Amino acid sequence: MHRAITIAASDSAAASGVQSDLKVFDRCGVYGACAVTTITAQDTFTVRRLYKLPASIVGAQIDAVTTDLGVGACKIGWYYSAELTTVIAGRVRRRSLHPVVLDPSLWSERGMALTPPRTIKRMIRELFPVATVVTVTARELKVLSGTPGETAEELASAAARIRAMGPQSVVVEDAPAPEGSTVLVFDARGAEQVASGPARGVVAGAGSIFSAALTAALARGDDLRQGARFAARFLEAAIGNAEVLGKGLPVAATLPVMEHQPPGEI
């Protein structure tokens, strides 16, 4: 069975974070392991409190599951503490985790700032060089690259600047397009629009679902463009199953079951 690990925060509402990632992995036919970075008191509306786990226990979790299960594909999701950056980057190298999907998660779906500036700087310096692909929203692309990202030329320039910092590829989940938004892949082959982008802010944890589905696709052996296409389809189906369970954003209550398909059938 294909395996993957998610290194991310615990979401007590299970709409994002390790809880959501493990559900996505399972629906995609991938066995999921996890390393929890932060414990949150979180609902469908906001993060109310958080507890930063010691770096030593985060590293120990990664060591335990990678040594025993031999997981390869890795998703790095949200974490709060800048100090964790060095631990995670070191474990990715030491345990030869590959491919690595980095989801910076700078803001929640409601626009709440999640990651401190100090952590963002460390992430760029230490995690970008070990990432296979960075998945971002258009807003995150502009902040991480330090350049505009409105036109096609600006998007390409911003993605190129991020790739120059280390990642092999960049996926923009909601690039501006005449029809609304689109999913763009920027890699060594150039740029390609692989799918229509889902509406942002319509379900809790949309970005987390997308990056987890992409990680699962890469764990199964898909190439990046095929995987991004699959992730967009998975998120679209998840949004279609969303339900209002709390007082905040709808939750993707029933995730789709999507089997691996040959490239010609995607």
Image (cartoon, helix red, strand yellow):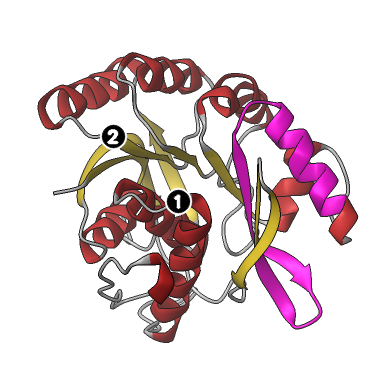
The quarter of the rendered structure image containing the C terminus is bottom left
**Please, is residue 148 above or below residue 179 in the view?**
above
Give the farthest residue toward the left. Answer: 68
**Please, is residue 62 above or below residue 202 in the view?**
above
Q: Nearer the viewer, residue 17 or 67?
A: 67
**Please, is residue 238 above or below residue 20 in the view?**
below
Q: Give the labeled residue for mark 1.
A: 223
Mark 2: few/some/many CA within 10 Å (<14, 14-19, 20+): some
Q: Is residue 176 left or right of residue 17?
A: right
* Marks 2 & 1, CB-CB < 8 Å contact: no
Tell me the residue at 25%/54% (across/down).
Answer: 22
The secondary element bearing badge 2 is classed as loop
- Tell me the tag on residue 206: none
The secondary element bearing badge 1 is classed as loop
Tell me the amino acid under the disc marked 1. Asp
Tell me the amino acid under the disc marked 2. Gly
Q: Give the labeled residue for mark 2.
A: 72
Mark 1: few/some/many CA within 10 Å (<14, 14-19, 20+): few
Q: Earlier in the sequence, mark 2 or mark 1?
A: 2
Residue span colored magenta: 154-183
